[in-house]
Amino acid sequence: MNIMSQRFGALEIQEDQVLDFATGVIGFPNERRFVLVPHNGTGFLAWLQSTETPALALPVVSAHAFGAKYPDVDIAQALSDVGLAGALEDVALMVVLCAPQGLPATVNLLAPIIVNVATRRGAQVILEGSRFTTRELFIREQDTAEAPKAQAAAE
C-alpha cells in the first residue's frame, strides 16, 4: 500500500502497519488510519502519519522517555472506556510533541495516545485525575539525570 505524506513523500507500507483509531484523535475526529514513522532512529520519537491526509503528521514521543513518573494514574479504566482493554504489556503509550521554532518543546501528558500493539487499534484518551497538563515541558528522564552531571562539570 502506498500513501502520500507532505513531510516524507511517498511511503510504501504494509496493511498490518496501519493503526486504526475508531474515533480519530483530538482535533481530527475524521482521521482514523495512521502509520507510525520512526524519526531518525531516536527510539523514542516518531511521527503519527495519516494515511488519508498527506499534511497530517503528528510528532509523538514514547512514554518510555519519561520513565516511571508517567503516567501518574492507572490507565486500565481509560483503556476499557475506549474498548482497548487487555494486557498492559500489549499497550504502547505515546504523547503528542509540540516543538515550535525558538520556543521550548512541550508534550501533552494529559491526553496520551494509546495503541494496542496486538490489535493495531488505538485511541487518544484524557487521563482523569492526572496532575499533568496538555503543555508540559519536554524533559526526558535521561535528560534530568544528566543535568546535575552537566552542572557539576561546568563548576
Image (cartoon, rainbow, N blue to C red):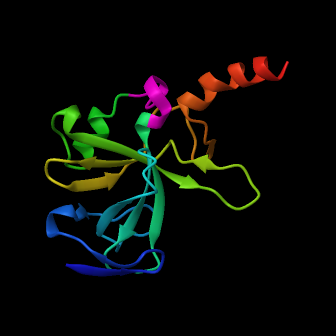
Q: Residue at the spot x=30%, y=65% of the render?
A: 35
Q: Please state the horizontal and vertical placement of residue 56, each as a whole percent of the image.
A: 45, 73
Q: Is residue 52 above or below residue 35?
A: below
Q: Residue 68 in magenta?
A: yes
Residue 38 seen in render: yes
* Magenta stretch in the rendered image: 65-73
Query: Which one is nearer the viewer's eye here, 106 or 144?
Result: 144
Query: Which one is nearer the viewer's eye here, 124 or 141?
Result: 141
Q: Residue at the spot x=47%, y=63% of the render?
A: 58
Query: Which one is nearer the viewer's eye here, 117 or 127?
Result: 117
Q: Residue at the spot x=19%, y=39% of the render?
A: 90
Q: Quadrant of the C terminus?
A: top right
Q: Residue furthest right?
A: 155
Q: Please state the horizontal and vertical placement of residue 117, each as a whole percent of the image.
A: 20, 48
Query: Which one is nearer the viewer's eye here, 144 or 114?
Result: 144
Q: Please state the horizontal and vertical placement of residue 111, each as a whole percent of the image.
A: 45, 47
Q: Please state the horizontal and vertical placement of residue 123, each as a whole percent of the image.
A: 31, 54
